[in-house]
Image (spheres, rainbow, N blue to C red):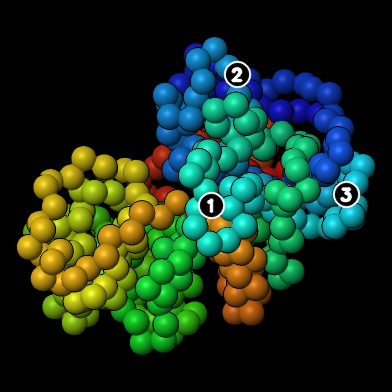
Amino acid sequence: MKRWILPADATDAGELVLQEAAKPVPGPGEVRIRVRAISLNYRDQLVLKGPFGRLPGRDLVPLSDVAGEIDAVGPHVEQWAVGERVTNLHVLDWPGGRPPAAMGLGLGALDEDGVLAEYVVVPAERVVKAPAHLGFAESATLPVAALTAWNALFGDHPVTAGSRVLVIGRGGVSLFALQLARAVGARVHAAVRDDEGGERLLALGADAYVNSLTTANWGQRVFELSGGVDKVVDTVGAAILPHALAALAPGGEIASLGLFDVAGPPLDSYALLAKQAVIRGVAVGSTAMHHDLVTFTQTHQLQPVISHRIGFDHAPDAYHVQASPKVFGKVVIDLP
Protein backbone atom coordinates (compact mmCIF):
# COMPACT_ATOMS: atom_id res chain seq x y z
CA MET A 1 0.00 0.00 0.00
CA LYS A 2 0.96 3.69 -0.16
CA ARG A 3 1.24 6.01 2.80
CA TRP A 4 2.53 9.50 3.45
CA ILE A 5 5.27 10.08 6.02
CA LEU A 6 6.01 13.33 7.84
CA PRO A 7 9.77 13.07 8.52
CA ALA A 8 10.92 13.88 12.03
CA ASP A 9 12.61 17.14 11.01
CA ALA A 10 9.97 18.29 8.50
CA THR A 11 7.83 21.37 9.16
CA ASP A 12 6.38 22.01 5.69
CA ALA A 13 3.84 19.97 3.75
CA GLY A 14 6.19 19.94 0.77
CA GLU A 15 8.50 17.71 2.80
CA LEU A 16 5.96 14.88 3.12
CA VAL A 17 7.23 11.63 1.60
CA LEU A 18 5.04 9.14 -0.27
CA GLN A 19 6.29 5.61 0.34
CA GLU A 20 5.33 2.00 -0.23
CA ALA A 21 4.65 -0.06 2.90
CA ALA A 22 3.29 -3.48 3.75
CA LYS A 23 -0.46 -3.61 4.21
CA PRO A 24 -1.03 -3.79 8.00
CA VAL A 25 -2.64 -6.89 9.48
CA PRO A 26 -5.20 -6.50 12.29
CA GLY A 27 -4.33 -8.26 15.52
CA PRO A 28 -6.66 -9.38 18.32
CA GLY A 29 -9.35 -6.78 18.95
CA GLU A 30 -8.43 -4.74 15.88
CA VAL A 31 -9.97 -3.92 12.50
CA ARG A 32 -8.45 -2.77 9.24
CA ILE A 33 -10.06 0.11 7.38
CA ARG A 34 -9.72 0.59 3.67
CA VAL A 35 -9.40 4.35 3.66
CA ARG A 36 -11.76 6.22 1.35
CA ALA A 37 -11.52 9.80 2.66
CA ILE A 38 -9.51 11.84 5.17
CA SER A 39 -10.30 15.34 6.42
CA LEU A 40 -7.92 17.96 7.74
CA ASN A 41 -8.21 20.09 10.87
CA TYR A 42 -6.32 23.15 12.10
CA ARG A 43 -4.74 20.81 14.64
CA ASP A 44 -2.96 19.11 11.73
CA GLN A 45 -1.26 22.39 10.81
CA LEU A 46 0.03 22.64 14.38
CA VAL A 47 1.39 19.09 14.24
CA LEU A 48 3.04 19.81 10.89
CA LYS A 49 4.89 22.85 12.20
CA GLY A 50 5.67 21.31 15.60
CA PRO A 51 6.64 21.01 18.36
CA PHE A 52 2.94 20.47 19.15
CA GLY A 53 2.12 16.79 18.65
CA ARG A 54 5.65 15.77 17.65
CA LEU A 55 8.24 13.56 19.32
CA PRO A 56 11.92 14.29 18.60
CA GLY A 57 13.40 11.94 16.02
CA ARG A 58 10.12 10.18 15.16
CA ASP A 59 8.73 9.99 11.64
CA LEU A 60 4.95 10.14 11.63
CA VAL A 61 2.02 9.17 9.44
CA PRO A 62 -0.07 12.34 9.85
CA LEU A 63 -3.79 13.24 10.04
CA SER A 64 -6.51 11.90 12.29
CA ASP A 65 -9.97 11.86 10.65
CA VAL A 66 -10.83 8.94 8.41
CA ALA A 67 -13.82 7.36 6.72
CA GLY A 68 -13.79 4.05 4.91
CA GLU A 69 -14.94 0.48 5.03
CA ILE A 70 -13.77 -2.38 7.18
CA ASP A 71 -11.96 -4.89 4.97
CA ALA A 72 -10.50 -7.21 7.64
CA VAL A 73 -11.12 -8.00 11.31
CA GLY A 74 -8.73 -9.49 13.81
CA PRO A 75 -9.40 -12.31 16.28
CA HIS A 76 -12.04 -11.72 18.96
CA VAL A 77 -13.77 -8.92 17.03
CA GLU A 78 -17.49 -9.62 16.95
CA GLN A 79 -19.07 -6.15 16.74
CA TRP A 80 -17.83 -5.38 13.21
CA ALA A 81 -18.05 -7.13 9.85
CA VAL A 82 -16.19 -6.71 6.59
CA GLY A 83 -17.87 -4.10 4.38
CA GLU A 84 -19.27 -1.86 7.12
CA ARG A 85 -18.82 1.88 6.56
CA VAL A 86 -17.12 3.57 9.50
CA THR A 87 -15.34 6.62 10.83
CA ASN A 88 -12.96 6.83 13.76
CA LEU A 89 -13.18 8.09 17.33
CA HIS A 90 -10.64 10.79 18.11
CA VAL A 91 -10.45 9.86 21.82
CA LEU A 92 -10.32 6.17 22.62
CA ASP A 93 -10.92 6.08 26.39
CA TRP A 94 -13.77 8.55 26.91
CA PRO A 95 -17.04 6.60 26.83
CA GLY A 96 -19.08 9.42 28.38
CA GLY A 97 -19.33 11.71 31.37
CA ARG A 98 -16.21 13.55 32.48
CA PRO A 99 -13.22 13.46 30.14
CA PRO A 100 -10.22 11.33 31.09
CA ALA A 101 -7.30 12.96 32.87
CA ALA A 102 -5.07 12.34 29.84
CA MET A 103 -6.81 12.29 26.44
CA GLY A 104 -3.74 12.38 24.25
CA LEU A 105 -3.78 14.20 20.93
CA GLY A 106 -5.43 11.55 18.77
CA LEU A 107 -4.13 9.72 15.73
CA GLY A 108 -1.37 11.34 13.72
CA ALA A 109 0.42 12.89 16.70
CA LEU A 110 3.11 12.00 19.24
CA ASP A 111 3.60 8.20 19.17
CA GLU A 112 0.39 7.34 17.27
CA ASP A 113 0.60 7.11 13.51
CA GLY A 114 -2.31 8.67 11.68
CA VAL A 115 -4.51 7.83 8.73
CA LEU A 116 -2.83 9.31 5.64
CA ALA A 117 -2.51 5.85 4.11
CA GLU A 118 -4.50 3.49 1.92
CA TYR A 119 -5.14 1.12 4.83
CA VAL A 120 -5.04 1.66 8.61
CA VAL A 121 -5.46 -0.69 11.57
CA VAL A 122 -7.15 0.57 14.74
CA PRO A 123 -8.74 -0.98 17.84
CA ALA A 124 -12.30 -2.14 17.17
CA GLU A 125 -13.48 0.22 19.92
CA ARG A 126 -12.09 3.17 17.99
CA VAL A 127 -14.53 3.01 15.08
CA VAL A 128 -18.18 3.99 14.80
CA LYS A 129 -20.71 3.61 12.00
CA ALA A 130 -20.74 6.40 9.45
CA PRO A 131 -24.06 8.22 8.91
CA ALA A 132 -26.09 6.22 6.43
CA HIS A 133 -26.95 9.22 4.24
CA LEU A 134 -23.42 10.59 3.85
CA GLY A 135 -20.66 9.69 1.46
CA PHE A 136 -17.14 8.94 2.63
CA ALA A 137 -15.90 12.51 2.11
CA GLU A 138 -18.68 13.99 4.24
CA SER A 139 -18.36 11.29 6.91
CA ALA A 140 -14.64 11.97 7.28
CA THR A 141 -15.40 15.48 8.55
CA LEU A 142 -17.17 14.26 11.71
CA PRO A 143 -14.51 12.93 14.15
CA VAL A 144 -12.96 16.27 15.19
CA ALA A 145 -14.71 19.33 13.72
CA ALA A 146 -18.32 18.17 13.94
CA LEU A 147 -17.86 16.47 17.31
CA THR A 148 -16.15 19.54 18.78
CA ALA A 149 -19.06 21.70 17.61
CA TRP A 150 -21.50 19.19 19.13
CA ASN A 151 -19.72 19.30 22.49
CA ALA A 152 -19.58 23.10 22.40
CA LEU A 153 -23.32 23.37 21.77
CA PHE A 154 -24.72 20.48 23.80
CA GLY A 155 -22.02 19.29 26.21
CA ASP A 156 -23.16 21.78 28.86
CA HIS A 157 -25.70 24.62 28.87
CA PRO A 158 -27.28 22.84 25.86
CA VAL A 159 -28.65 24.95 23.04
CA THR A 160 -32.37 24.52 22.37
CA ALA A 161 -35.04 26.03 20.14
CA GLY A 162 -34.98 29.79 20.58
CA SER A 163 -31.44 29.91 21.98
CA ARG A 164 -29.09 32.53 20.57
CA VAL A 165 -25.64 31.40 19.45
CA LEU A 166 -22.55 33.28 18.30
CA VAL A 167 -20.05 31.53 16.02
CA ILE A 168 -16.66 32.97 15.18
CA GLY A 169 -15.18 32.82 11.71
CA ARG A 170 -15.74 30.48 8.78
CA GLY A 171 -13.80 27.37 9.80
CA GLY A 172 -15.05 23.81 10.00
CA VAL A 173 -16.15 23.89 13.65
CA SER A 174 -17.98 27.20 13.16
CA LEU A 175 -19.86 25.90 10.12
CA PHE A 176 -20.88 22.72 11.93
CA ALA A 177 -21.97 24.77 14.96
CA LEU A 178 -24.12 26.92 12.69
CA GLN A 179 -25.76 23.90 11.05
CA LEU A 180 -26.34 22.02 14.31
CA ALA A 181 -27.73 25.07 16.10
CA ARG A 182 -30.08 25.91 13.24
CA ALA A 183 -31.29 22.29 13.18
CA VAL A 184 -32.57 22.59 16.78
CA GLY A 185 -34.21 25.93 16.06
CA ALA A 186 -31.61 28.26 17.55
CA ARG A 187 -30.81 31.70 16.15
CA VAL A 188 -27.22 32.14 15.03
CA HIS A 189 -25.10 35.27 14.77
CA ALA A 190 -21.57 35.28 13.40
CA ALA A 191 -18.43 37.36 13.72
CA VAL A 192 -16.18 37.21 10.65
CA ARG A 193 -13.25 39.14 9.27
CA ASP A 194 -14.67 39.67 5.79
CA ASP A 195 -18.07 40.47 4.33
CA GLU A 196 -17.82 37.75 1.68
CA GLY A 197 -17.58 35.14 4.42
CA GLY A 198 -20.44 36.78 6.30
CA GLU A 199 -22.70 36.65 3.26
CA ARG A 200 -21.93 32.96 2.79
CA LEU A 201 -22.81 32.31 6.43
CA LEU A 202 -26.13 34.09 5.91
CA ALA A 203 -26.80 31.81 2.94
CA LEU A 204 -26.08 28.82 5.19
CA GLY A 205 -28.66 29.97 7.73
CA ALA A 206 -27.08 32.60 10.00
CA ASP A 207 -29.43 35.38 11.10
CA ALA A 208 -26.83 38.17 11.03
CA TYR A 209 -23.10 38.78 11.02
CA VAL A 210 -20.68 41.41 12.25
CA ASN A 211 -17.40 42.22 10.54
CA SER A 212 -14.89 42.09 13.39
CA LEU A 213 -12.23 43.92 11.37
CA THR A 214 -14.35 46.99 10.70
CA THR A 215 -16.36 47.01 13.96
CA ALA A 216 -14.17 47.95 16.92
CA ASN A 217 -16.49 46.76 19.70
CA TRP A 218 -17.92 43.87 17.75
CA GLY A 219 -18.95 41.84 20.81
CA GLN A 220 -21.10 44.71 22.02
CA ARG A 221 -22.55 45.05 18.51
CA VAL A 222 -23.54 41.35 18.57
CA PHE A 223 -25.22 41.94 21.92
CA GLU A 224 -27.21 44.84 20.45
CA LEU A 225 -28.28 42.81 17.41
CA SER A 226 -29.19 39.64 19.30
CA GLY A 227 -30.25 40.89 22.72
CA GLY A 228 -27.34 38.85 24.12
CA VAL A 229 -26.35 35.36 23.08
CA ASP A 230 -26.73 32.27 25.25
CA LYS A 231 -23.70 30.52 23.80
CA VAL A 232 -20.44 31.66 22.21
CA VAL A 233 -18.54 29.02 20.24
CA ASP A 234 -15.04 30.48 20.58
CA THR A 235 -12.91 28.93 17.85
CA VAL A 236 -10.18 31.57 18.17
CA GLY A 237 -8.94 31.47 21.76
CA ALA A 238 -8.41 33.66 24.79
CA ALA A 239 -7.76 36.78 22.73
CA ILE A 240 -11.46 37.26 21.97
CA LEU A 241 -12.82 36.58 25.47
CA PRO A 242 -13.54 40.28 26.14
CA HIS A 243 -15.68 40.44 23.00
CA ALA A 244 -17.31 37.11 23.81
CA LEU A 245 -18.26 38.33 27.28
CA ALA A 246 -19.65 41.54 25.81
CA ALA A 247 -21.85 39.53 23.42
CA LEU A 248 -23.07 37.14 26.10
CA ALA A 249 -26.45 37.30 27.80
CA PRO A 250 -26.51 36.95 31.61
CA GLY A 251 -26.05 33.31 32.60
CA GLY A 252 -24.67 32.34 29.20
CA GLU A 253 -21.67 30.16 28.33
CA ILE A 254 -18.51 30.65 26.32
CA ALA A 255 -17.39 27.29 24.92
CA SER A 256 -13.70 27.99 24.33
CA LEU A 257 -11.84 25.65 21.98
CA GLY A 258 -9.66 27.82 19.79
CA LEU A 259 -5.89 27.56 19.51
CA PHE A 260 -5.37 30.39 17.02
CA ASP A 261 -4.68 33.09 19.63
CA VAL A 262 -4.29 31.87 23.20
CA ALA A 263 -2.45 34.90 24.64
CA GLY A 264 -5.32 37.25 25.36
CA PRO A 265 -5.67 40.37 27.51
CA PRO A 266 -6.48 40.07 31.23
CA LEU A 267 -9.98 38.74 31.81
CA ASP A 268 -12.51 41.35 32.92
CA SER A 269 -13.59 39.79 36.21
CA TYR A 270 -16.29 42.40 36.71
CA ALA A 271 -17.95 41.46 33.41
CA LEU A 272 -17.60 37.76 34.23
CA LEU A 273 -19.23 38.18 37.65
CA ALA A 274 -21.87 40.66 36.52
CA LYS A 275 -23.12 38.30 33.83
CA GLN A 276 -22.60 35.18 35.98
CA ALA A 277 -21.06 33.70 32.86
CA VAL A 278 -19.49 30.28 32.37
CA ILE A 279 -16.29 29.78 30.39
CA ARG A 280 -15.84 26.09 29.50
CA GLY A 281 -12.90 24.51 27.75
CA VAL A 282 -13.92 22.13 24.94
CA ALA A 283 -11.78 19.43 23.34
CA VAL A 284 -13.53 17.10 20.86
CA GLY A 285 -15.95 14.77 22.68
CA SER A 286 -16.83 11.38 24.10
CA THR A 287 -17.97 8.18 22.42
CA ALA A 288 -21.53 8.87 23.62
CA MET A 289 -21.40 12.35 22.08
CA HIS A 290 -20.14 10.91 18.80
CA HIS A 291 -23.04 8.43 18.64
CA ASP A 292 -25.50 11.24 19.43
CA LEU A 293 -23.94 13.36 16.69
CA VAL A 294 -24.32 10.57 14.11
CA THR A 295 -27.97 10.01 15.07
CA PHE A 296 -28.72 13.74 14.94
CA THR A 297 -26.94 14.15 11.61
CA GLN A 298 -29.01 11.34 10.11
CA THR A 299 -32.28 12.54 11.63
CA HIS A 300 -31.84 16.04 10.25
CA GLN A 301 -30.10 14.90 7.03
CA LEU A 302 -27.31 17.41 7.59
CA GLN A 303 -24.73 17.84 4.86
CA PRO A 304 -21.24 18.93 5.97
CA VAL A 305 -19.78 21.82 4.00
CA ILE A 306 -16.76 20.71 1.96
CA SER A 307 -14.55 23.35 0.40
CA HIS A 308 -12.04 21.22 -1.53
CA ARG A 309 -11.55 17.55 -2.38
CA ILE A 310 -7.99 16.59 -3.27
CA GLY A 311 -6.60 13.28 -4.50
CA PHE A 312 -4.42 11.13 -2.24
CA ASP A 313 -1.36 11.48 -4.47
CA HIS A 314 -1.56 15.26 -4.02
CA ALA A 315 -2.03 15.20 -0.24
CA PRO A 316 0.55 17.96 0.44
CA ASP A 317 -1.65 20.35 -1.55
CA ALA A 318 -4.46 19.75 0.97
CA TYR A 319 -2.35 21.31 3.71
CA HIS A 320 -1.71 24.41 1.62
CA VAL A 321 -5.38 24.81 0.71
CA GLN A 322 -6.54 24.34 4.29
CA ALA A 323 -4.11 27.00 5.54
CA SER A 324 -5.79 29.68 3.42
CA PRO A 325 -7.88 32.20 5.42
CA LYS A 326 -10.41 32.17 2.59
CA VAL A 327 -11.25 28.46 2.79
CA PHE A 328 -14.96 27.92 3.52
CA GLY A 329 -15.68 24.40 4.70
CA LYS A 330 -13.63 21.26 5.19
CA VAL A 331 -10.71 20.11 3.06
CA VAL A 332 -10.88 16.40 2.27
CA ILE A 333 -8.40 13.98 0.72
CA ASP A 334 -10.10 11.38 -1.50
CA LEU A 335 -8.95 7.82 -2.15
CA PRO A 336 -10.37 5.50 -4.82
Residue corresponding to mark 1: 144
Cα distance between the residues tagged 1 and 3: 25 Å
Q: Nearer the viewer, residue 296 or 6?
A: 296
Q: Quadrant of residue 75?
A: top right
Nearer to us: label 2 or label 3: 3
Residue 39 location, x and y as percent?
58, 47
Cα distance between the residues tagged 2 and 1: 23 Å
Residue density around tag 2, few if under 14, some if 14–19, many if 20 or more, within 10 Å? some
Q: Amino acid at mark 3?
A: Val
**In this rendering, is residue 183 above or below 24?**
below
Q: Residue at x 40, y 77 (%)?
A: 159
Secondary element at image label 1:
helix
Residue 233 location, x and y as percent?
34, 62
Q: Amino acid at mark 2?
A: Asp
Upstream in sequence: badge 2 or badge 3: 2
Q: Residue at x 88, y 49 (%)?
A: 77
Cα distance between the residues tagged 2 and 3: 30 Å
Secondary element at image label 3:
loop
- Counting every numbered tag in the picture gives 3
Q: Which mark is residue 59?
A: 2
* Image quadrant containing the N terminus: top right
Say whether residue 325 is left or right of residue 12.
left
Q: Quadrant of residue 80?
A: bottom right
Upstream in sequence: badge 2 or badge 1: 2
**In this rendering, is residue 34 above or below 62?**
below
**In this rendering, is residue 20 above or below 217?**
above
Say whether residue 272 is left or right of residue 279.
left
Q: Amino acid at mark 1?
A: Val
Residue density around tag 3, few if under 14, some if 14–19, many if 20 or more, within 10 Å? some
Residue corresponding to mark 3: 77
Say whether residue 292 is left or right of residue 327.
right
Residue 214 location, x and y as percent?
13, 58
